[in-house]
Image (spheres, rainbow, N blue to C red):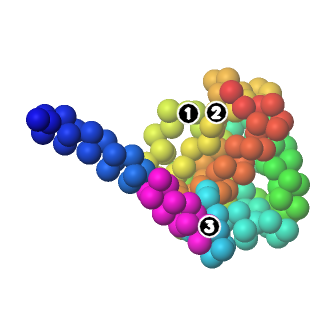
Amino acid sequence: MRNRKSHRSVRAIRTSDSVLPVQAGVVAALLVALTGCGITIPSDPDDTLGHAIGAELRIGIAVEPPLSEDGDPPRGPLPELAIEYAETLDASPVWSIGSEETLVEMLEQEKLDVALGNFSPDSPWSERAALSRPFTVDGADPAELVALMPLGENAMLSNFETFIDSTERAQ
């Protein structure tokens, strides 16, 4: 006579084994279907990166010598970083100068694509703006800075992080 418990546990394993390939197939089919729809990951719900490419990169600068100084255009290591980034997007920099709070408000109102200042990785603005991975520039104190971008605009954030990685500024 067979032991029913053993039979059931073997049967349960077989059922589980057959479900896994089906689930993987469903996930693969969904990914193929979404790719055909033009959905990319990471994405920008407001298409921040898409609007900047080949057009204008709206950059907010908090004037904080020696990192950045007021001028037309602003001067210093942070504006230089922003100009380099804009070049990778074939975009013209459009500058806004303001306090940290003003720049964060402008990000929330979709008036800026990126804000640069003496923002640290433990920035109090993290609930209102996306923070990039830490990076460094000449004259930075503390040694690590982050850029601020609109919340949810993950393609823009990812693109900026790829840029800082390529310039070997990432921490």
Describe residue 18's horizontal placement relative to residue 30 as left or right: left
Position of the N terminus, as image quadrant, is top left
SS for callout 3: helix
Can you see residue 31? Answer: yes
Identity of the residue drawn at 83% across and 59% down: 89
From this view, report whether residue 94 is shown above or below residue 131.
below
Of pointers 1 and 3, the one earlier in the residue sequence: 3
Which residue is tagged 3? 32
SS for callout 1: loop
Identity of the residue drawn at 72% across and 51% down: 159
Residue range in magenta is 21-33
Mark 2 to mark 3 CA distance (whole Å): 34 Å
Residue 87, given in percent of the width and then of the height, sits at 88, 54
Q: Is residue 134 magenta?
A: no
Q: Is residue 29 magenta?
A: yes
Q: Amino acid at mark 3?
A: Val
Q: Main secondary structure of the magenta part?
A: helix
Q: Which mark is residue 134?
A: 2
Mark toward the viewer: 1 or 3: 3
Query: Callout 3: 10 Å neighbours few (<14), some, many (20+)?
Result: few
Can you see residue 46? Answer: no
Query: Callout 1: 10 Å neighbours few (<14), some, many (20+)?
Result: some
SS for callout 2: loop
Which residue is tagged 1? 121
Where on the picture, by quarter, is residue 132?
top right
